[in-house]
Each structure stands twice: as structure tokens, then as C-alpha cells.
């Protein structure tokens, strides 16, 4: 094992795939001369040249469309959005183009294309730059949606995404790019659609994914000190969702809390809750609880940012509720 930052794991995945396949290229704002807005693509221009590491104008709709067209002609583009908040400018290209062209062409145009970049909040960036759109894209047939939480997962899942024959939405976090973690040496792939049990437990199942996993881990440490052992299921991929792993865990713990950084209506947590009550209702000893972003646009003020996001206090409260434990009134 070796220790890499999250950004280094992503870069290593892209470098390895681009060395092995000359049809792969990356394009986006500042990916080349500036080495990437978050330094994910640092050094890639020097190694692969300007024909495969391409700076674009601030025109997401345009360069997303160029990438889709190139994929229809057999190339394998990686599109970097500076943030998925800006992907809304290109959402018609993604939803009505990338997600549908293979079906509408009768299977003539399978697309190997990855749209990647940071999602959700990253501190005090205001309402327009703090949105989690995983559930938006996961709602769309024809796309796969990946949201890793650790450097090791980021590398293995990105390599699998680049090789996949469907368009993949690969969502990261600005606040995790500097996070360090152990990454296996050598070649490895993590299949899409396979959840990971990050922590074993027998009292309650907590399902989560992406950056918010780290808050769940901290809350679980606190719960363990109080005698509640939580099992953490990291979905890693939210389309397709590994329901089997979630349901097997719930059958063991008999309780479920879902934590995600998104607005509550039509969220991933809604879908997981439906599936569990549909397939494992008789195993539940308490109603399912979820912890999401508050149902308001994100504020700029630091105290309101914290009040809006899922936090350890809210997670612990939800877990104690499904465990029928008395709540601290403070």
C-alpha cells in the first residue's frame, strides 16, 4: 500500500489509462496550462501533449457536446467540470445526448465518456456553488453515477468508469482533494455498482456515500463510545445502487439510517428507503430515518452552512431514534 492524496489517486488513474489507450483524452477549463483548477491534472500536459490534454473556453455546453461527438466516433473523452454546479450549462448535452444516443441509434453509438469534477458544498461558496446533483443524474437511464469517498475508491472507480461502455458521471469533492489515504500498489479496478462496508456493526446500518461518509464515520466513533455499533455501507455508486448489500446489512441490524448531502425530496435516500421497506420490511424493528441537507438553498454565512448540512449531531440523533434510546434534550 502507498499513501496518496485524493487528487493524486485520480491523476494516477487517468495517467495509467491514458498510457494504455491512446484514444483517451481529457478536456476542460484549466486542465492543461494551469495543471487543473484543483491540480488533479498536474503534469499531464507535459506527458501527453496538447492534443490529449485540452484547455477549453468557459463554455460547458460546447465542450461537453464536442466530447460526446468525439465519443460517437470512437474516442474516449474525460470531461472535467470545474464544479458540477456548472454542469447545468451542459445538462442538455448530457441528458438528451450522452444518455440517449446509444438507444436512439439502435446500439450503433455506445459512448465511453466520463464527466468528472467536484459536487456539493465546499465551504462558504453560496447558493449557486453548493449543490449536490447526484440524484438528478441518477434519475436518468443511460447514465452511471459514481461518488467515491476515499483515495483508494477514487482510483479504482475512475479506472472502471473510463473503461465502461456507458457514460459515467464521476462526482468528487473540493474538500477531499487534499485528503490522504492508503491506495493499493499496482493495477486494480473497483467494479461499478458494488457497495463497500466501511465499518462492521450489528446495532444499526448507516448508508451513505461521498464526502459526507467522513461525518458518518466520526458520528459512528461517538456512538461506539456509547455502546451503539453502527455498520457503515458506502454505496460508492448511486446508479446502479447495490441494494443487495444494503438489504443484507439491514437484515442483520434491523435498523436503517441514510445520510446524504442533498435536498430531501426525490433524493437517493428516498429511493433506498423505498427499496428496503419493499424488500426487507419484516426485518425492520424501527421506521427508517434519514439525514439530508436542509430543504433550503445554501447560505453564505459559516454558521448557516453548518446548520444546513448533515452533521454528527443530527446523525447521532437519528441513530438513537431508530435504537429507541432517550435523546439528550440539549
Image (cartoon, helix red, strand yellow):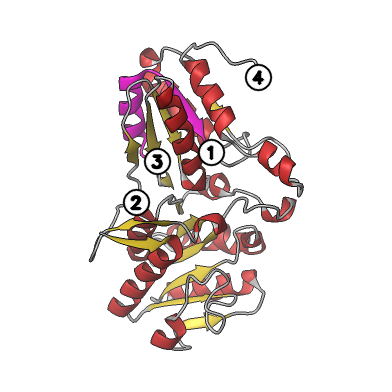
> Depth check: 158 or 229 in front?
229
Q: Position of residue 29 (x, y in %)?
A: 60, 75
Q: Indicate the quadrant where residue 57 lies.
A: bottom right
Q: Indicate the quadrant where residue 240 lies.
A: top left
Say whether residue 17 is magenta: no
Q: How many angstroms separate mark 1 from mark 2 (CA)?
A: 19 Å
Q: Residues at badges 1 and 4 in contact (C-beta under 8 Å)?
A: no
* Element marked by disc 3: strand
Front position among marks 3 and 2: 3
Q: Position of residue 131 (x, y in %)?
A: 64, 50
The label on residue 234 is 3
Residue at image mark 2: 192
Front position among marks 4 and 2: 4
Quadrant containing the C terminus is top right
Q: Residues at badges 3 and 2 in contact (C-beta under 8 Å)?
A: no
Q: How many angstroms separate mark 4 from mark 2 (CA)?
A: 42 Å
Question: What residue span does the magenta drawing correspond to?
Answer: 241-259
Residue at image mark 1: 260
Which label's residue is closer to the chain start, 3 or 2? Answer: 2
Q: Position of residue 198 (x, y in %)?
A: 34, 39
Amino acid at each position: 500500500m502507498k499513501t496518496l492524496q485524493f487528487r493524486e489517486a485520480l491523476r494516477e488513474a487517468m495517467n495509467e489509462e491514458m498510457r494504455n489507450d491512446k484514444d483517451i483524452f481529457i478536456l476542460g477549463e484549466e486542465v492543461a496550462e494551469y495543471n487543473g483548477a484543483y491540480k488533479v491534472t498536474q503534469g499531464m500536459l507535459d506527458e501527453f501533449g496538447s492534443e490529449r490534454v485540452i484547455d477549453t473556453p468557459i463554455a460547458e455546453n460546447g465542450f461537453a457536446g464536442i466530447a460526446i461527438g468525439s465519443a460517437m466516433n470512437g474516442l474516449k473523452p474525460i470531461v472535467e467540470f470545474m464544479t458540477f454546479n456548472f454542469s447545468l450549462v451542459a445538462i442538455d448535452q448530457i441528458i438528451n445526448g450522452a444518455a440517449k444516443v446509444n438507444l436512439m441509434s439502435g446500439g450503433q453509438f455506445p459512448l465511453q465518456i466520463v464527466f468528472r469534477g467536484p459536487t456539493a458544498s465546499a465551504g462558504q461558496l453560496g447558493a449557486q456553488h453548493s449543490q449536490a446533483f447526484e440524484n438528478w443524474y441518477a434519475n436518468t437511464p443511460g447514465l452511471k453515477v459514481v461518488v467515491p469517498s476515499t483515495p483508494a475508491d477514487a482510483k479504482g472507480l475512475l479506472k472502471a468508469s473510463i473503461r465502461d461502455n456507458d457514460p459515467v458521471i464521476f462526482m468528487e469533492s473540493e474538500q477531499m482533494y487534499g485528503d490522504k489515504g492508503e491506495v493499493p500498489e499496482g493495477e486494480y479496478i473497483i467494479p461499478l455498482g458494488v457497495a463497500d462496508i466501511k465499518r462492521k456493526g450489528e446495532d444499526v446500518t448507516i448508508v451513505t456515500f461521498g464526502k459526507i461518509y467522513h461525518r458518518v464515520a466520526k458520528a459512528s466513533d461517538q456512538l461506539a463510545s456509547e455502546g451503539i455499533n453502527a455498520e457503515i455501507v458506502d454505496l460508492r455508486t448511486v446508479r446502479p445502487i447495490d441494494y443487495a448489500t444494503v438489504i443484507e446489512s439491514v437484515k442483520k441490524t434491523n435498523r436503517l439510517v441514510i445520510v446524504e448531502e442533498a435536498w430531501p425530496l426525490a433524493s437517493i435516500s428516498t429511493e433506498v428507503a423505498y427499496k428496503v421497506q419493499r424488500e426487507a420490511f419484516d426485518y425492520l424493528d424501527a421506521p427508517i430515518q434519514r439525514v439530508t441537507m436542509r430543504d433550503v438553498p445554501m447560505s453564505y454565512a459559516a454558521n448557516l452552512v453548518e446548520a444546513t448540512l448533515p452533521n454528527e449531531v443530527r446523525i447521532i440523533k437519528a441513530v438513537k431514534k431508530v435504537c429507541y434510546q432517550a435523546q439528550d434534550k440539549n
